Image: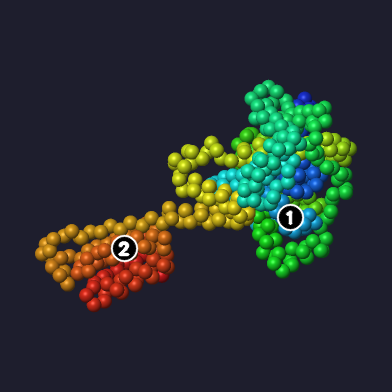
Amino acid sequence: MRRFRIARQHLSRPSIPSRETLSVWRADFTSSLVVFLVAVPLCVGVAVASGVPAELGLVTGIVGGLFTGLLPGSSLQVSGPAAGLTVLVYEAVQEYGLGTLGALVLIAGALQLAMGALRLGRWFRAISVAVVQGMLAGIGLVLIAGQLYALVDARPPGNGPANLGGLPDLAMDTLGSDTALAALAVGAGTIALLVLWPKWQRAARVLPAPLVAVALATVVVFVLDMPVARVEVAGLLEVIQPPGGADFARLTEAGAVAGALGTVLAFTLIASAESLFSAAAVDRLHDGPKTDYDKELMAQGAGNTVCGLLGALPMTAVIVRSAANVHAGARTKASRVLHGVWLLIFAAAFPAALGVVPLAALAGVLVHAGVKLLPVKQWRPLWREHRGEAVVLAATAVAIVATNMFEGVLLGLLMAVAKSAWETSHVHLEIVGLDEPAGHGEPAVLGPRRPIRVRALGNATFLRLPKLLDQLEALPKDREVQLDLTGLRHLDHACAAALGAWEEQRRGPGGTARQEAPSVTP
């Protein structure tokens, strides 16, 4: 009877009121429109800056909404092409060709799926914050340097150092060209509006700054008929090129394997780290269900696999669109799925609308995005409180600008590991009996004084070995030394071997030494 009552109570529970359901759908619907308006200029701008057709950026945004948006992981995070991978995509396209981009993205997506299945998503939270900030700063610097050329309708000369070195000539060429000055005015006006519009908080909550800036720049260029370059567009079906066997074969040619492998690893690690760091940031913005990092990594991998099959740009979860989604009041994943629907309708029904957008306006959006990647406000307190972290950040950024994304991030990770190893490998020697006067106390075996007792404390690693040996070798040669290693929490092989050699040397003719109770043996 009791079971029957419980069942009756369960069946009689009221369903969610229709008014509340309508409220949730209304919030998701309006949020999807906001995200769509933010995503359009960013998808197109990232594609153009990456050296690929503008439509491929929209394809990635559509996949991020309609496909990745349906998968579990993070409920409010929005995926699409990201400025953080712009430099890497551009270099890959220049090196291997547009046809191989899909192959690279497909392999990276498969690796993300494997890492998510192996439950490695949570380990991305162990990456040094300084390396991540340095990575973003390096990306920002390279992005700014490249987009300054697009800001005046010029073509960048090449990689980061070449772009930076060509800026003085670019300035001189711009001053002597009316067309370049017109494009600069459009781009500078776009940046100014991006900076000033958020200060009008009431308007910014209704219309996002990137949409307003690009729309206004487009209207001004159209009305004044300014001689500036515009986005070149075609239909979605024309630009979708699934990778074939020849594209995969091109990556395995002699001399290309190492570079292709590095590019794939960079795609995988950077896209995964950026997505999961974005997920952590988005979780702090709302009170809803939190991210399952392994499922989110698999969702990103599945999305990149589809993007690779379509020959599109790689995707990541993007904090700009995700924050806009949360701030617009999104309640469920329906908002990000709907934003993909609006992108598909826009790209399929109104592709010509992109043909009136000036490239200088999109360059202004990306220059502004690049500046926001620079940790300007965080640098001073970081240098004051954690100088080693600041050095890792700066070195990572400089290395990315000087070399490429993969080598720069790898150098940053190595520096972070070396810094952590140095900071944790503290070893301290407690020396007792060194100042005891001759003839005091009980006579020792080889002299009138008691032996010197040396007790090692901490972690003895090869990083501290020079200092450790200097202290031991400075002890008097005519005194017996008792070395106690029981206070060591860790003794690596290099230190154990060096201490053994020191002991043998002290036991030689004219020297004494005795090691007591080593805690770890080599």
Residue 455, position as x, y percentages in the image? 29, 60
Residue beneath the point at 65% across and 55% down? 266
Q: Secondary structure at mark 2?
A: helix
Which residue is denoted by mark 1 in the rendering?
Answer: 94
Disc 1 packing (10 Å; few <14; some 14–19; many ≥20): few
Along the line of sight, the residue nearer the viewer: 128 or 334: 128
Disc 2 packing (10 Å; few <14; some 14–19; many ≥20): few
Q: Nearer the viewer, mark 2 or mark 1?
A: 1
Instruction: Check disc 1 and give the amino acid type.
Output: Gln
Please, is residue 232 above or below residue 448 in the view?
A: above
- The CA distance from mark 2 to mark 1 is 53 Å
Instruction: Check disc 2 and give the amino acid type.
Output: Asp
- Residue 274 showing in the rendered view: no
Tell me which label, 2 or 1, sits earlier in the chain.
1
Which residue is denoted by mark 2 in the rendering?
Answer: 470
Q: Quadrant of the N terminus?
A: top right
- Residue 250 showing in the rendered view: yes
Along the line of sight, the residue nearer the viewer: 69 or 437: 437
